[in-house]
Image (cartoon, helix red, strand yellow):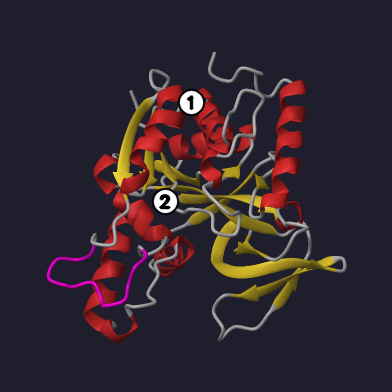
Amino acid sequence: MEEKTLVVLAAGMGSRFGGMKQIEPVGPNGEFLIDYSIYSAVRYGFNKVVFVIKEENYDVFKNTIGSRIEGKVKIEYAFQKLEDIPLGFDIPDGRVKPWGTAHAVYAARDYINGNFGVITADDFYGDDAFKVLSEHLSNSNNYCVVGYNIGDTLSKNGAVKRGVIIHENGVVKSIVESSCMLEGEKVKCTPLDETKDSFYVEKDHPVSMLLNGFTTEILTTIGNDMESAFKNNQDKLLDYEMLLPDIMDQDIENGKTIDVVSTTAKWMGMTYREDTENVKNFIAQEIEDGVYPKNLWN
């Protein structure tokens, strides 16, 4: 059987949300956002889930979501650790947080064999998104990013970070990590890279919500990026962060093709605590429409 792995990035504590939003109940029987992602992933052929978490959160994850899905799919736990750095180097004094989203994916490297998907634990991606992701992983060795309309991903409660996809004929040219918010009829995007100017896009412009498909080639790129950073940028390591879109940009420069995969699914997130009620109402409507059963794991 083809091994199809879903890597779930769940090490973040959700500071803007005000707590551990990964285990905030949003379903009628106490389901979390990640329950719905895993349910759809299993429905469309994923047969292993790797949770990337902080080691100190192992018990709470295993006793909540882990216990619910045992027997439904194979589960592994990978720990994102500050100490997971290239051999022969030291952690700079004052560094307290891990090394970013790409580093989180790299933490799962021992559990990945073949093409794999990556999501975050605190986003609702929608059922169709996992269908199109699974199909792409089975039929192509290109990377992919599932694109959502940026206007459908914004919060009414403040600016949000988004990976704005710059593409040509469905092929990604770059992903610009930006702080985005609605301004009139368009969306203003301010790149996190302060050397780049703000720009505007239409509300139907595609963004990456960290629902991606990869081959194991990206793990090599991440490892090489870390090695280079520790060798050549010692003075910048205190703030160094490997963002997954930046790693993808490197592979694009090296000739790797990244496809934009469209989905009819609606993305929902809980950046701010005020977003929770909207997410609960949306999931209730999805259940009423027959997309998900009321009792998800029964």
Counting from the top left corner in percent of width and height, residue 63 is at 40, 29
Residue at 51% x, 47% y: name it.
20
Residue at 23% x, 61% y: name it.
83
Residue 159, placed above or below residue 278: below
Q: Which of 21 and 203 is in front in this view?
A: 21
Residue at 50% x, 31% y: name it.
38
Quarter assignment of residue 113: top left
Q: How many labels does the image show?
A: 2
In the rendered image, residue 55 lying in the magenta stretch gets the answer no
Can residue 111 be spotted in the picture? yes
| Horizontal side, residue 257 vs residue 151: left or right | left
Residue at 67% x, 45% y: name it.
267
| Horizontal side, residue 136 vs residue 100: left or right | right
CA gap, disc 1 and disc 2: 22 Å
Quarter of the image for the C terminus: give it: top right
Residue 194, placed above or below residue 280: below
Identify the residue position indicated by label 1 in the image. Answer: 42
Quarter assignment of residue 246: bottom left
Counting from the top left corner in percent of width and height, residue 49 is at 39, 34
| Residues rendered magenta in the picture | 85-97
Amino acid identity at mark 2: Ala
Identify the residue position indicated by label 2 in the image. Answer: 11
Residues marked 1 and 2 touching at CB (< 8 Å): no
Counting from the top left corner in percent of width and height, residue 210 is at 53, 52
Q: Which of 43 and 154 is in front in this view?
A: 154
| Horizontal side, residue 142 vs residue 83: left or right | right
In the rendered image, residue 90 lying in the magenta stretch gets the answer yes
Amino acid identity at mark 1: Val
Under tag 1, what secondary structure? Answer: helix
Residue 193, placed above or below residue 264: below
Under tag 2, what secondary structure? Answer: loop
Dot 1 or dot 2: first in sequence order is 2
